[in-house]
Image (cartoon, rainbow, N blue to C red):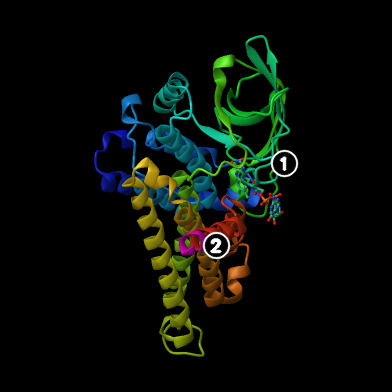
Amino acid sequence: MNLLKLNNQDDRLDALKEAVKPFEDRAWKHDKEGTFPTENIKELQSIHYTALTVPEEYGGKNISLLELVKAQEIISKADGSTGLSVGWHMGIVKNLAETKAWPQQLYKEFCEKAVNDGALLNNTASETATGSPTRGGKPTTIAVKNGEDWLISGRKTFTTMAPVLDFFVVSAAIEGEDSVANFLISRESNGLSIEETWDSMSMRGTGSHDLVLDKVHVPANRLAAYLTPGDKAAAGWLLHIPACYLGIARAAKEYASSFALEYSPNSIEGTISELPNVRQKIGEMELKVMQSQHFLYSVASQWDNASETEQQAMKPELGAVKLSVVNDAISIVDLAMRLTGARSLSAKNPLQRYYRDVRAGLHNPPMDDMTIMLLASHTLSNSRT
Ligand SMILES: Cc1cc2nc3c(=O)[nH]c(=O)nc-3n(C[C@H](O)[C@H](O)[C@H](O)COP(=O)(O)OP(=O)(O)OC[C@H]3O[C@@H](n4cnc5c(N)ncnc54)[C@H](O)[C@@H]3O)c2cc1C
């Protein structure tokens, strides 16, 4: 199967649904052992999923944001950790095509590697000192000029997909200047190592370890872009995040609904699916899934159809959809667990994993408090007489 050869979005999504079926079983082991689902990523590479957001001129499919969120939801329904992991790569590649933030040659070279070898990248922006980079903190990772090239030293936290990344997009402050830049650093570079620090209770299979850089030599042409810390540009690609948590919420809803149709305690005739208290929860879950889906798909397709200027005005919607979908995903998993009862707490029950995994969404960007403040400013600036 080669998704790049399928010209119809629905065919690609159907093929992806088939491909991710084994991920569900593997999720147990990786969650339990805190290991990275390398085999899932290899399978996504082998069907060329990881090249779908590459522009057509470089051999990809330039899929729309709407298709990307639908695809990410499918993967995350099977395994949230795999979905969030590959979602960063997919989204960043799409974002770079839209913003043209990198020199054309550098982006082209990476894209060709993504198409031909399944190369993967991710942004490593977070640090202990800055916390979430969205708050505007300056990296303590430092780039020192070395002739025409650079020597980069520092430590990055939360490097999702660290076990399989081919390239790390590392943000670093430039010594002696007030500027910060992203550098594209290859995994093979001397002085680069991964410290296996990821011990989170959520998204245990994302391999979000620390990246340690000790005077890593980076060629001059790998300075990919100058950055403004806490950049306020609208970022449609970040919708891969709510897509991930909606996928997990759907899995919880389906599990609880199937359980309701099967569970028949001897206090009643038939199954608990006929009881009003259970049907109430099923209806509430369905309502939240529907609301999330429509909000997410509508904002994604609005982005797809907007001009660049219109996209920049979409920050309030982009923040709102992430906040709404993630918080509803947490509520949906909660309802699914209440419906299922104490069995949901068993280590053998998938709901306890979904419960832990959806919490991570609160700590992916943009953060809820920033979104609420943005919505307040948006309202007040539109209300000014
Ligand atoms: C599963 C997962 C995967 C991730 N993958 C990646 C990745 O691939 N690459 C990457 O770079 N990062 C990644 N991250 C990191 C993520 O983007 C955040 O940097 C990280 O979660 C820390 O955010 P925080 O809000 O907890 O931390 P902090 O920013 O330290 O915030 C902690 C608390 O302090 C408050 N706070 C801190 N600063 C301010 C401020 N200036 N104003 C107001 N309140 C403030 C916050 O409200 C919060 O309550 C990942 C995180 C998770 C959970």
- Would you say 325 lies left or right of 214 here? left
Q: Is residue 18 visible?
A: no
Q: Residue furthest top?
A: 147
Amino acid under disc 1: Thr
Segment colored magenta: 380-385
Q: Is residue 8 magenta?
A: no
Q: What secondary structure do most residues of the magenta stretch adopt? A: helix
Mark 2 C-beta to ligand 1 under 8 Å: no
Name which residue lies at 55% across and 42% down: 37
Can residue 333 be seen? yes
Q: Residue 266: give x, y in percent of width and height.
A: 50, 87
Callout count: 2
Query: Where is residue 19 shown, x and y percent of the image?
Result: 38, 45
- Give whichever of 76, 92 is nearer the camera: 92
| 22 relative to 161, above or below | below
Question: Which quarter of the figure has residue 2?
Answer: top left
Q: Nearer the viewer, mark 1 or mark 2?
A: 2
Which label was assigned to residue 197?
Answer: 1
Q: Which structural element holds mark 1?
A: loop
Nearest to the observer: residue 210 or residue 38: 210
Q: Is residue 188 above or below residue 293?
A: above
Percent coordinates x, y for residue 335 in the rendering: 53, 73
Q: Quadrant of residue 254?
A: bottom left
Three-letter amino acid code at disc 2?
A: Ala
Instruction: Kindly identify which residue carries mark 2.
Output: 376
Image marks 1 and 2: residues in contact by CB distance under 8 Å? no
